[in-house]
Amino acid sequence: MHHVLARITAKPEAAEATRGILSELAVKSRTESGCVAYELYQQEAAPHVFQTVECWKSRADADAHMTTPHLAAAVAAAGPLLAAPPEILAWTKLE
């Protein structure tokens, strides 16, 4: 299994719009080949901060996700709303 955690920090005034974009991305991503799980979280104390927790069957599946049209559309739509570039970390499950 290959896991990806992405932290997305929106401008505070753009939290709701960013949430909509990321929610749509999550729904579409769950239909991709190799997607085991794709969860979206919103920080309670700082509602403009989001976290995805993704589980893919393989690194290749996660890499393929990065080239999908729906991800490109989400990046283009959310880009102006973000306070910083997303922090994306890949993890490999050991057990």
Image (cartoon, rainbow, N blue to C red):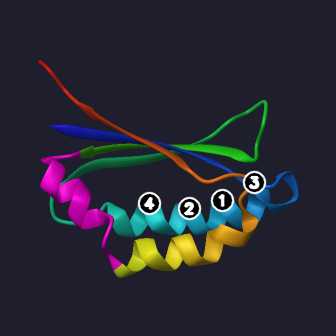
Is residue 80 shown left or right of residue 38? right
C-beta proximity under 8 Å, tags 1 and 2: yes
Query: What range of the chain is rendered magenta?
Result: 56-68
42 over 75 or under it: above or below: above
C-beta proximity under 8 Å, tags 2 and 4: yes
Among numbered discs 1 and 3, the one appearing first in the sequence: 1
Residue that appears at 69% across and 52% down: 84
Q: Nearer the viewer, mark 3 or mark 4?
A: 3
Picture coordinates of residue 34 (x, y %)?
15, 57
The residue carrying mark 1 is 19
Q: Would you say residue 31 is visible in this rendering?
A: no
Among numbered discs 3 and 4, the one appearing first in the sequence: 4
Quarter of the picture holding the N terminus: top left
What kind of residue is marked 4? Ala
Picture coordinates of residue 8 (x, y %)?
60, 49
Quarter of image, res 91: top left
Picture coordinates of residue 44 (x, y %)?
73, 33
8 over 66 or under it: above or below: above
What kind of residue is marked 1? Arg
Q: Secondary structure at mark 4?
A: helix
Q: Secondary structure at mark 2?
A: helix
Q: Give the camera-side residue of 57 and 92.
A: 92
**Mark 1 and mark 4: Cα distance apart in space:** 10 Å
Residue that appears at 20% across and 40% down: 2
The residue carrying mark 3 is 83
**Mark 3 and mark 4: Cα distance apart in space:** 20 Å
Q: Which mark is residue 22?
A: 2
Quarter of the picture holding the C terminus: top left
Is residue 19 shown left or right of residue 33? right
The residue carrying mark 4 is 26
What kind of residue is marked 3? Ala
Residue that appears at 53% across and 72% down: 74
